[in-house]
Image (tube, rainbow, N blue to C red):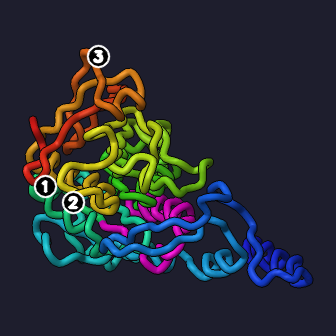
Amino acid sequence: MARVLILLCTLAAVSAVPVQDPVIRKLVPDDIRYNYAEAEDGTLHLVDSWVKVSDLVKSARFNPDVDNQYHLFTRDNPNLSQPIVLGNREILSLTNFDPTKRVIVLIHGFLGSGTAGSNQALVPAFLAGEDVNVIVVDWSRGSHWGLNGIQVGRAVARFIDWLNSVTGATASQYHILGFSVGGHTAGIVARHVQGDVAYVTGLDPSSRWEIDEILSPNDASYVEVIHTSAGVNGWKDPLGHVDFYPNGGNIMPGCNLNIVCDHQRSYIYMAESVRTGGFTGWECRSQPEASIGSCSLPGRLRMGGLLPKTGSRGIFFLRTNRRAPFSQG
């Protein structure tokens, strides 16, 4: 109700101003207001990074507690998902959710959906790698505007708290992964869940995001980030306990200077790491050093994988092949 009142007051305040759609907030500098962002099907959309009154109106219509959908995949139903509905124990009892197993939560990005490319790559990879519960979060009804990712994250946390209260699962069983906008949303989920989430992976977290709500190492016991379009579609600076910069963090081999392909390689590399391991990174002193691959520290660490490397810290560089298998070991 308070949010609606604020919105109405805002609309009333600007009604006398001769501007049809006033700008409320600028998320980026003036000279780069408009930029192309990719949907998860690879199509490009021209995005206005300044928040306007009309954006607040669209956002106000989206209620993630109602509009979010949760799809469960397990080894018993690897291809056809089972719905889990917040607050509905009867529907939950009909699913294959097993509270004794780890829980993988996948969050798509801008203009994505439950069938997004990240989910198509990661669901079968996790089920092949381990007998786990995989929950796909579909927030497609609100993904037309990236800032909805903040309220989506808080809603997903409420869903997880309910699920745990009913089943006895705990936050320490969770691995939460998000791609692009979903990379920051994954952190918001973890920081609002009751208990300490074991593992968060940011898959090239979006460069277009609220600075106060970015993914942080404080969000979970172990936070890992894979940067594949750093400074373009993805966040440039380190965000986690461990940050990997494959091939320097952008211009992925085999992508032929396609920034959408660069961005998507983050979840493709993650999926391969879950299935087969590999991807050994060399420790760097800084992000600029990682960006040129000039890393001489003795530390080595595997990127991605099924289990968190809790206690590890640092920035790492590695090289990949042009095509699958991408790992060079």
Position of the C terminus, as image quadrant, is: top left
- Going 61% across and 80% down the picture, which residue do you hit? 58
Note whether 62 is above or below 274 in the view shown.
below
Closer to the eye: label 3 or 2 = 3
Pick the front one: 234 or 288: 288
Position of the N terminus, as image quadrant, is: bottom right
Q: Does residue 186 show up?
A: no
- Pick whichever of labels 1 and 3 is earlier in the sequence: 1
Mark 3: which amino acid? Leu
Note whether 197 is above or below 83 in the view shown.
above
- Pick whichever of labels 3 and 2 is earlier in the sequence: 2
Residue denoted by label 3: 297
Question: What x and y, as percent, mark residue 194?
Answer: 48, 49
- Going 13% across and 50% down the picture, which residue do you hit? 322
Residue denoted by label 2: 122
Residue 295's quadrant in the figure? top left
Residue denoted by label 1: 131
Mark 1: which amino acid? Asp
Question: What x and y, as percent, mark residue 318?
Answer: 22, 34
- Pick whichever of labels 1 and 2 is earlier in the sequence: 2
Q: Is residue 52 magenta?
A: no
Question: What x and y, as percent, mark residue 85?
Answer: 39, 76
Residue 99's quadrant in the figure? bottom left
- Going 44% across and 53% down the picture, which residue do you hit? 232
From the viewer's perspective, tell me whether residue 317 is left or right of residue 155: left
Cα separation, mark 3 vs mark 2, equals 31 Å
Q: Which residues are magenta?
A: 136-164
Cα separation, mark 1 vs mark 3, equals 36 Å
Callout 3–callout 2 Cβ contact below 8 Å: no
Q: Is residue 140 magenta?
A: yes
Q: Circle 1 sits in a helix, a strand or a loop, which is it?
A: loop
